[in-house]
Image (tube, helix red, strand yellow):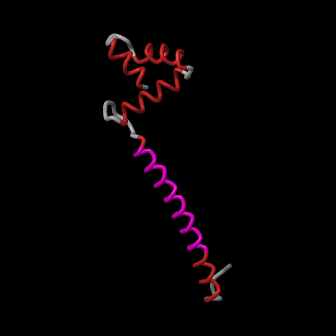
Amino acid sequence: MRLVAEARKEDPELSLNAAVNRIGQRVGVNADTLRGWCKQAAIDAGERPGTTTSDAQRIKSLEAEVRELKRANEILLAASSFFARELDPRLPW
């Protein structure tokens, strides 16, 4: 990513795609992979809009927490209805 940034500083007319293709071939990294890294670095630096890496990690952990809480809720709901039926024989199974 540093090499791509340096190449673009040396030649301001050089597009990101051209720099990525040139540098990617030299260092043996797939151009699409390098392009993605450069774009994500620009997002993390606040130079372009998007979800930062730290925000994406936080979102992922919050989504996992929500899944776990929903699962626990379902278990508690099933347990409460089971015990309610045990206590009140008039309720249907």
Residue 10 appears left or right of 27:
left
Q: Quadrant of residue 54?
A: top left
Magenta segment's dominant SS is: helix
Q: Is residue 60 above or below residue 44?
A: below
Residue 75 % position (x, y): 59, 70
Quarter holding the N terminus is: top left
What is the x, y in percent for residue 59? 44, 49
* Extent of the magenta region: 54-78
Residue placed at 43% from the left, 15% from the top?
Answer: 19
In the displayed structure, does residue 28 sit left or right of residue 42?
right
Q: In which quadrant of the rendered image does the C terminus lie?
A: bottom right
Residue 5 lies in the magenta-colored region: no
- Asked if residue 61 is among those painted magenta in the image, a careful observer would answer yes
The residue shown at (33%, 35%) is 45
Q: Vertical placement of 67 versus 48: above or below?
A: below
Residue at image location 65% in from the left, 86% down from the top: 86
> Who's the residue at 47% across and 28% down the image?
36
Is residue 37 or residue 1 the one in the foreground? 1
Q: Position of residue 85 (x, y in %)?
A: 63, 83
Residue 79 on image: x %, y %: 60, 77
